[in-house]
Every structure is written in C-alpha cells, then in structure tokens.
Image (cartoon, rainbow, N blue to C red):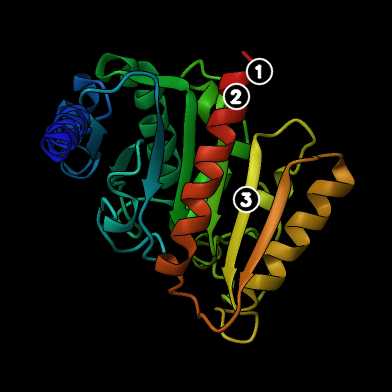
Amino acid sequence: MKKTLVLLLSLLIYSANWAQKTEYVQINNLPYYPEYNTKQDTYLKERCVLDLYYPKNTKNFATLIWFHGGGLTGGNKEILAGLKEKGFAIIGVNYRLSPKVKVKNCIEDAAAAIAWTFKNIEKYGGNNALLFVSGHSAGGYLAMMTGLDKKWLQAHNIDANKIAGLIPLSGQVITHFENRKERGIPETQPLIDEFAPLYHVRADAPLLLLITGDRELELLGRYEENAYMMRMMKIKGHTATTLYELDGYDHGMIEPALPLVIKEINKRSQFLSQTK
C-alpha cells in the first residue's frame, strides 16, 4: 500500500512538472521597420526582418537579440540551438549587407531591430528592462556600435543605456574592415574613428562581456583588439567590462562561448530583478 502511494505521488509530481513545462514558439520574418520604409525600399523589405523565439507561458523573461556574422557582406538570421529552451527569448535579426548598402546602413538596421524589441517584446510577455544584445564577428561589431554610440538608438528615442548587457563574440572593436574597404583602406591597416566601438568607450555604458577565441588562432589580432577595449573601458571608469579568451578555439568560437552567454544573461537578469 505504501509503495502504491509513493508511486501515485511520484506520478502526480511528474504530471504537475510536465504541465508546467515551458512551451516555446517561434514567429518568423517579422518586419522591424515601419511599413512606409518597406514600401520605399524593396531590398530593405526583403532583408529587414527578424525571427522571434520565446517562452509562451512565461512572463517577464529576458531577451537576447542576436546579430549574425559574415563580415557585413553575407550571412542570415539564426536562432542558435545552443541558446534554445533556456528561459529567455531569442531574436535572430537579418540586416542589409554591403556592398548593396554602406556599413552605416547595417548599423541603422541593427538599431531599428533593437528599437522594435524594446517597443514590442512586452506584448509577448517579455521584460524590456532585460534586453541583451549579442552576435558573432560582424554581429558583435553591430552589438557594440549600437550599444556604445548612443546616436543610433537615439534616432528611435531610446537610450542605449537601457540595454541590460552587450555580449559580443569576437567582435571587431576598431573601425570595421568593410567600412575601411569603402574608403580604400586595406584590412591590415588599423583605424579608429566614429565607426569603431573603441572610439565610443564610456563609463556609463551597459554591461560589456567580451568573448574571443585563442589569441594565436583568432582573426587579424581580434583578441588583442578586445583586450585593448577592455583596458580602455576600465580606464574610462566602466566597472562592468569582462574579457574571456577561449583557449584552443579560432574565430568560429560560437558554440563554446554560448554557456558564458547564458550564464551572464541569467546572472544579470537576477541582479536587475533584485535591484528593482
């Protein structure tokens, strides 16, 4: 009799846990510019869409905006498998690509996608105070440019400091090589100007978690760029900049970096929830 009661109790607990299991849904190709923009520009209409993956029966969840890599000349939006079913939403963003547009247009698109998320994620149950921006390589560059140079989000009446955290993976912090190419500057010639995240270091920026591959295996000194970024942010007075170097991994270090991304989202979300 006692064994039967234990078995029944176990089944009830299992059923309750199953009933409470989070359900995730995905909505694809949501336009993030107003309709009048897409009517005027067919390429913008084609590229400027995002996919939203979110926990349907959850409230006040965090959201990670993810910009794909590809040197600002290629790539497509993605919802990474390693980020799924972790309790937060993921937004995979497409943006216009060079040479069809200039690098500044890529940054404008990234800012528009972030603005869309700030204005719409609460409709799906999310908390726009828990919005993180990330991406790999060119995507990491876009995350930093929109989060550090406040003018891009100011165009949408949004303060970039409202971003909960910037988590670029192997992002370029000097002027992007595609922008240098537009001006006839070779990719091996470093430049730091308004199109460099490093140019916009500031003490009051959102949390910044920098992740790169092994310094001996990375692309064109990418680790050293990020190390300098960390140093200059700290010199500027920013107290929440951290750098991780993933030993043994080259520029395509996305998968081993994801546990660090998830850990930071959870830790920062918990901290921000407790400080409200």
Q: Is residue 1 visible?
A: yes
Distance between the alpha carbons at the discs numbered 2 and 3: 16 Å
Q: Residue at x 65, y 18 (%)?
A: 275
Residue 192 percent coordinates (x, y): 71, 58
Check the image and report above or below for 172 versus 235. Answer: below
Q: Of residues 210 and 151, which is closer to you in this image?
A: 210
Residue 47 percent coordinates (x, y): 22, 45
Residue carrying label 1:
275
Q: Residue at x 36, y 33 (%)?
A: 113
Q: Is residue 244 shown left or right of residue 266?
A: right
Q: Nearer the viewer, mark 2 or mark 3?
A: 2
Q: Is residue 35 shown left or right of residue 96?
A: left
Q: Residue at x 32, y 55 (%)?
A: 97
Labels 2 & 3 near each other (Cβ < 8 A): no
Q: Residue at x 82, y 52 (%)?
A: 232
SS assignment at label 2: helix
Amino acid type at mark 1 = Thr
State which quarter of the image contains the N terminus: top left
Residue carrying label 2:
272
How crowded pointer 3 is (Cα within 10 Å; few <14, some 14-19, many 20+) is rated as many
Amino acid type at mark 3 = Leu
Labels 1 & 3 near each other (Cβ < 8 A): no
All told, the count of numbered labels is 3
State which quarter of the image contains the C terminus: top right
- Give the mark nearer the N terminus: 1 vs 3: 3
Q: Quadrant of residue 229?
A: bottom right
Residue carrying label 3:
209
